[in-house]
Image (cartoon, helix red, strand yellow):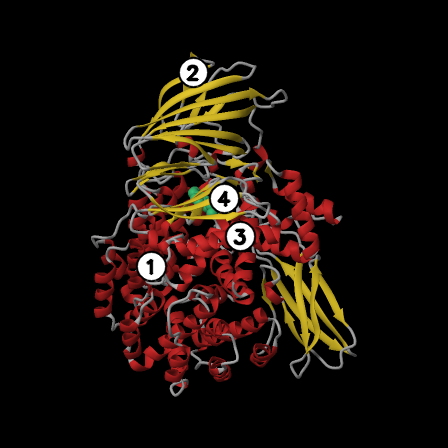
Amino acid sequence: MAEATPQTIYLKDYTPFGYQVDEVHLTFHLSPKATRVVSRIEFTPKPDAVERSFFLHGEQLKLIAAKIDGQPVSPDVTAQGLTCDVPSTPFVWESEVEISPVTNTALEGLYMSNGMYCTQCEAEGFRKITYYPDRPDVMSTFTVRIEGDEKVLLSNGNPTDSGEGWAEWHDPWPKPAYLFALVAGDLVNHPDSFTTASGQDVELNIWVRPGDEGKCAFGMEALKKSMTWDEQVYGLEYDLDIFNIVAVDDFNMGAMENKGLNIFNSSCVLASPETSTDANFERIEAIIAHEYFHNWTGNRITCRDWFQLCLKEGLTVYRDSQFTSDMRSASVKRISDVIDLRGRQFAEDNGPLAHQVRPESFQEINNFYTATIYEKGAEVIGMLKRLVGDEAYAKAVALYFERHDGQACTIEDWLQVFEDSTGRDLSQFSKWYSQAGTPRIKVTDDYSDGTYTLTLEQSTPPTPGQPDKDPRVIPVAVGLLGQNGDEVRGTEVLELTEAKQSFSFDGLASKPVPSILREFSAPIIMERESTNAERAFLLAHDSDSFNRWEAGNTLAKEARVAMVLDAAAPDADYLDALTKLVRDDSLDPAFRALVLSPPSQSDLAQTLFERGHTPDPQAIYDAAETFAQTLAEALTDSLPRLYADTTVQGAYSSDAESAGKRDLNARILSLLTRLDGGEAAARQYDAADNMTQQNAALACLLKAENGEAQSQAFYDQWQGDRLVMDKWFGLQVACSAPKKAASAAANLTEHALFDLKNPNRFRAVMGALAMNQAGFHYEGGAGYQLLADNLIALDALNPQTTARMCSAFQTWKRYDSTRQELIRAQLERISATDNLSRDTNEMVSRILNG
Ligand code: 0A1
Ligand code: ZN
């Protein structure tokens, strides 16, 4: 059992801290088991304070000494922090605490990874370093002195002085404690420099473990591109003399935007053609941009409290997606983002973990770094921009930076700048922040006397704690096509504000074919009766590339639904359209690859569930297999030529065009493997000089159960590279047939290189199991049990990663009663574990009771 009654924190209870923090001085005497942290903090009581009690957060700290204005004091200390009597005039608080970085397996606060010291303070990790008002609305300048034997000693801001065994840093920008960072280790750097638009020189470094120097160049280019882009598109410049990035092997998330000292999971920064796939390169570029963009959206303007997390995350994800669209293909980026949104956020929004983009209560804030806050939060920004227009968006954002620089803000502040600069009333729009759940829009249409009418009806299903919802403002981008495929009306944004509303288009010579929700203009589920003929027409003619793909995606889904429900054969018209598309060299290879990629098994399960069926993961898997086999056979004559034509020759380049071609090539190889048993894949494996092709070939071979030799060769070649070995661990499970997936994962947890303490390795195996839907849900429940065993074991070491992984169970109510009972038993077993963390306890009880 977890702690007796976990405390719930409410947005409505927000009260400002009663003291202003004027200056923070920290001195670290580093030692693995007994680091001493000495703090000297200047406080001024706020004259208008509502809350007078002086409470400093502090967890797992050994208090050695405390003083106020130089005089020893004896505060009241609990497991959460301390309170102390303090003067009513400005005073200096000093404390000395002892902490043990080497035993910190939660990877929160100050910890050690491969012998290097590093920190993770968001959201509430600083309180594990020293006593402090650890809340984002308390902002101060920090001066830090680090004493240690390590060659490299880093903190936020600019370096001010250093000598043998010590270094000092000063960060002139007031910041909340969650942006504090410290790194100490025998690291090497990949240096570069950047001159800002206004002529400031900035020293850039990527710091890595010796041996990884060769994997930094791509990340450095991505950083410089991000800096330039933010100047050009948002007019935002960097504001310190130095920008450091450090790669760390043990990290709970992707990366962290600490001021001037970003800390990255090494998987999100290290890249080389031999060890990284195209997908890795693209993700690294996006994450470097994301963390860099936080310097303004997050750091210069931060969040008043953690309920406002989407203020920085939604906006920063939106900005990084704009960046990727500009650097690569905008339409491919949009389609990929929607696939991801539907796969992760829709699953969350339509299950027991559904929550608002701005939640109003939580037990553990770390459980709210979710697809809803990040990705739906970004969609909300995109809708706002679409509603007000590009120019008004730019003006409002400029006002946001002008008005709120240096402040800790709320969603109300954000919406206010849009209201003030556009004159628009955004009270109804704000429901996107306060109402959880994915809206459904039912669409019907009518044509008579040259007038075409679209009727849109919106509703949002109940979510935990919110049975009823009001209508929202929903921008629905629509275009109309004539019978010959020409566009008769260009894209127009309909503003749906009522529960039911009609929109008319006059002067049409004949009934048009509507292209609705172009560019996926709102994160909703559209319900509309359509025919395969109409979908095929849009797939062939729509000028909106998102909707073109969407038409193909719907065809793909409907074909599989019919196969699952009616044991139908794969739809012949769709197969025909697909074979034509694959062969159409005039189309962008990346787009062809997307059209060829099947809808996810989870998406199909959700679709079936919504239509009142109980999804059978095995039947969904079998339909996907049959479909792919039929497609491969239909393409028998073309596959070898297509494979040859799409094979990228010459030296590897990670650019979007080559990557799109390799993606298409990999999908063709997987079809070809169904016909040749793996001959082409084995040849590709032997010839590959880059990880994208090596990985794709190995995946095909493992799936065909004909890759033992290559798997061993891969292991022998890469066993010394942790990131590549994560791929090896993941592939064994991802490519397993459903009935073997759980045992494959179980065997891997016994492998000498499996390491519960390394989140990347844990996720490689357990994440792959959860993603292998038919394997995870295979009859008998071995997958559920294995995951629960591992979650229980991990919770004692690392609550954050355990709690995140619990979401693998979030869709349990979709399934049949046997599976539900098997899952319930595992969730209850986890919940009954002694000393279960607050993180995991909250997730399991929300999943069980939501
Ligand atoms: N703010 C970071 C993500 C992050 C969040 C929480 C962490 O620990 C609990 C670590 C990183 C980002 O958005 O990139
Ligand atoms: Zn972020």
Residue at horizontal 28%, vertical 57%?
725
Q: In what element is the residue under mark 2?
A: strand
Q: Secondary structure at mark 4?
A: strand
Q: Quadrant of residue 75?
A: top left
Residue named by callout 3: 317
Please, what is the three-letter code of the amino acid marked with disc 4?
Val
Asked if the residue at tag 1 contacts the one at tag 4, i.e. Cβ–Cβ closer than 8 Å, the answer is no
Quarter of the image for the N terminus: give it. top left
Q: Is residue 692 above or below residue 213?
A: below
Q: Nearer the viewer, mark 4 or mark 2?
A: 4
Which of labels 2 and 1 is toward the front? 2
Mark 4 is surrounded, within 10 Å at the Cα level, by few (under 14), some (14 to 19) or many (20 or more) other residues, namely: some
**Mark 3 vs ligand 2: CB under 8 Å?**
yes
Query: Would you name the residue on which mark 1 appears?
Result: 769
In the image, 485: left or right of 94? right
- Of circles 1 and 3, the one toward us is 3
Where 81 falls versus 585 (above or below)? above
Q: Which residue is mark 4?
A: 202
- The residue most toward the bottom is 637
Residue 11 percent across, percent down from the top left = 56, 37
Give the spatial CA distance, label 4 vs label 1. Answer: 44 Å
